[in-house]
Amino acid sequence: MALVRVALGARSYDIVIEQGALDRVGDSLAPYARKGRLVVVTDANVASTQLPRLHASLRAANIAIEPIILPPGEQTKSWRHLEQLLDALLALEIERGDHIVALGGGVIGDLVGFAASILKRGCHFVQLPTTLLAQVDSSVGGKTAINAKAGKNLIGSFYQPALVLIDPSTLDSLPPRETRAGYAEVVKYGLIDDPDFFEWCHANAQALLAGDPDARTIAIQRSVQAKAAIVADDERETSGRRALLNLGHTFGHALEADTGFSDTLLHGEGVAAGMALAFRYSARLGLCAQADADRVTAHLKAVGLPYDLSTAHVQAGGAELVGHMLHDKKMAAGTLPFLLARGIGQTFLSKDVALDDVAAFLDADR
Ligand code: NAD
Ligand code: ZN
């Protein structure tokens, strides 16, 4: 078992990482069950694969489960499903002191966290993340959100859970493509500021992706520690340090936009290609050794993630992709804040990247 404490000012909460935890979670969740019952929100995929495990361990601790099962997919982060969820929680007579359990990926975590933050002006919630992305990224840091017509994650709050309990064995039922996409956010922490962790990833990625419990646990623990440290420094994204977590995301979002935010390119796959592009662009600017950019590209390729426009199935040219970047970022006179690198583990925020140069790079990188 590994434990990471997230400290935010006077408050703190624990992130527990433990192989098989879901099968014996009854005792740790008992303090959160009022009148011997717990409300668990999940999606239909997780309900058929992981909910029975939670059910059995709660039953063994004499806790009854009230499941609320939502449809899977990004569309569930909507006003409509938020309203349905809040009504369902109110129908179960949830009280302010109650804890709502979110069992699922980032969609369930973001939606339930937001619902918990506004229901009765705030009730507690516990996260049991079941995708690698949720375990290493979305369950840490307290951002909650739903999507709006104008864009993703535009309506939400900063709201911290009471506890995050991560059982790496939940990944056994996750489609391998989803695990690989989540892995992009793992190796991201190495690329940001931890070259040793990049080396660990280089040596252990295949074992992790093949389901090795120790490799999964170490990867999750180091990722959670890295994110918790950045978040503790900059909880509400004011100092700029938290922006480092967006390595690969400016390029990545443009690729996701071009593929219509569809199954053609999962978020983590866009981030993988985006990180490779950020390193190759840094090399082109003479900031980073070409050998480092080549290592990043080769690593992503070796684990089966996209690493350029064609492996990301992107048709658009450079100008069009830069158009997508401008659409969701603030720009100052033809420049865009951009995360670039001086080497592996040496990411920094550059404020003066010329957009026409980025477009030319993207056209040349094909
Ligand atoms: P997801 O929740 O949609 O899960 C991906 C798919 O896997 C879904 O079909 C889900 O039903 C299924 N699934 C989940 N766990 C499973 C399991 N153990 N076995 C079988 N199937 C399982 O997507 P995600 O990638 O986990 O999260 C993406 C969301 O996270 C996005 O909405 C994104 O905006 C959000 N996010 C939030 C933060 C944050 O800081 N709050 C950070 C990154 C991403
Ligand atoms: Zn991401």
Image (cartoon, helix red, strand yellow):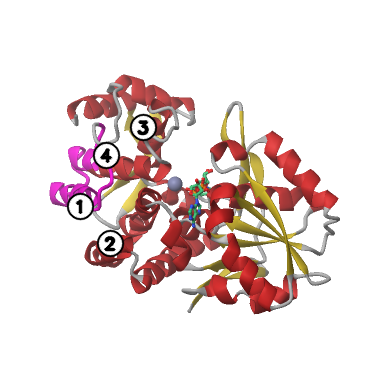
Q: Earlier in the sequence, mark 3 or mark 2?
A: 2
Three-letter code, disc 1:
Ala
Our reading of the magenta stretch's main secondary structure is helix
Residue 94: image quadrant is bottom right
SS class, disc 4: helix
Real-space Cα separation, disc 3 to disc 4, in angstroms: 11 Å
Real-space Cα separation, disc 3 to disc 1, in angstroms: 21 Å
**Residue receiving disc 2:** 205
Please tell me which residue lies in front, 109 or 224.
Answer: 109
Please provide percent x and percent y for residue 255.
36, 32
Reply yes or no: does residue 240 show up in magenta.
Answer: no
Please tell me which residue lies in front, 22 or 184.
Answer: 22
Left or right position of 184 against 53: left
Assess whether mark 4 and mark 3 are in contact (beta carbons under 8 angstroms).
no
Please provide percent x and percent y for residue 73.
54, 41
**Residue receiving disc 3:** 255
Give the crowd class for mark 1: few <14, some 14-19, many >=20 residues within 10 Å: few
Real-space Cα separation, disc 4 to disc 1, in angstroms: 16 Å
Three-letter code, disc 3:
Leu
Three-letter code, disc 4:
Leu
Assess whether mark 1 and mark 2 are in contact (beta carbons under 8 angstroms).
yes
Give the crowd class for mark 4: few <14, some 14-19, many >=20 residues within 10 Å: many
Q: Nearer the viewer, mark 4 or mark 1?
A: 1
Please tell me which residue lies in front, 346 or 270.
Answer: 270
Relative to 161, residue 1 above or below: below
Q: Earlier in the sequence, mark 4 or mark 1?
A: 4
Please tell me which residue lies in front, 50 or 156.
Answer: 50
Q: Earlier in the sequence, mark 3 or mark 1?
A: 3
Q: Is residue 7 visible?
A: no
SS class, disc 3: helix
